[in-house]
Image: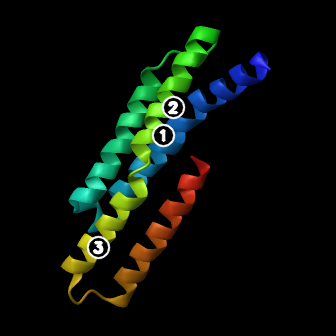
Amino acid sequence: MQKMLFQVAMFLHRELPIRLAHRVRDLDSIPMLNQLKSTKEVRAMYATSFEEIRAAPTPNSRAREEHFAELLERIYTRHSAVLLTMARSAYELRADMGSMSFIETDAIHRFLDSFYMSRIGI
């Protein structure tokens, strides 16, 4: 059982920074939405989590695995606000949009759909 925990922890230690970096890149790439305060808050959450995992020692012992599990719990708690914060971003954007074209609106909807679906993989 302990060997399996180490393997899972090692996988997460290696894989989560990649996935978090992709979310940061995605948030930076969407025009208009990336300038909103709420989107910047979410981006900061992802960037902070990325940095914390990268700074964490490789969980290759019981003590390090426990420390890493505690780190993941803190990250999980931090990210619990992401959906609401992104919803606030969408609301802010809608208020600022005015007469935005359907194509721009469709691109933002596709981005948000993709962003929310990618969270399942994290």
| Residue 117 sits in quarter | bottom right
Give residue 30's position: percent from left, percent from top.
35, 64
Graded by Cα atoms within 10 Å as few (under 14), some (14 to 19) or many (20 or more), the crowding at tag 2 reads some
Q: Residues within 10 Å of mark 3 (few under 14, many from 20)?
A: few
- Residue at image coords 39%, 48%: 24
Q: How many marks?
A: 3
Q: Which residue carries the number 2 mark?
A: 72
**Residue at the location (21% across, 79% down)?**
95
Name the residue carrying label 1. 76
Few, some or many C-alpha atoms within 10 Å of disc 1 (few <14, some 14-19, many ≥20)? few
Report the disc number at residue 91.
3
**Residue drawn at point x = 45 percent, y = 68 percent:** 111
Q: Nearer the viewer, residue 71 or 110?
A: 71
For the residues labelled 3 and 2, the Cα–Cα distance comes to 30 Å
Q: Are marks 3 and 2 in contact (CB under 8 Å)?
A: no
Say whether marks 3 and 1 touch (CB < 8 Å): no
> Which of the two labelled residues, at mark 3 and mark 1, occupies the earlier sequence position?
1
Give amino acid for label 3. Answer: Tyr
Q: Is residue 115 visible?
A: yes
- Indicate the amino acid at tag 1: Tyr
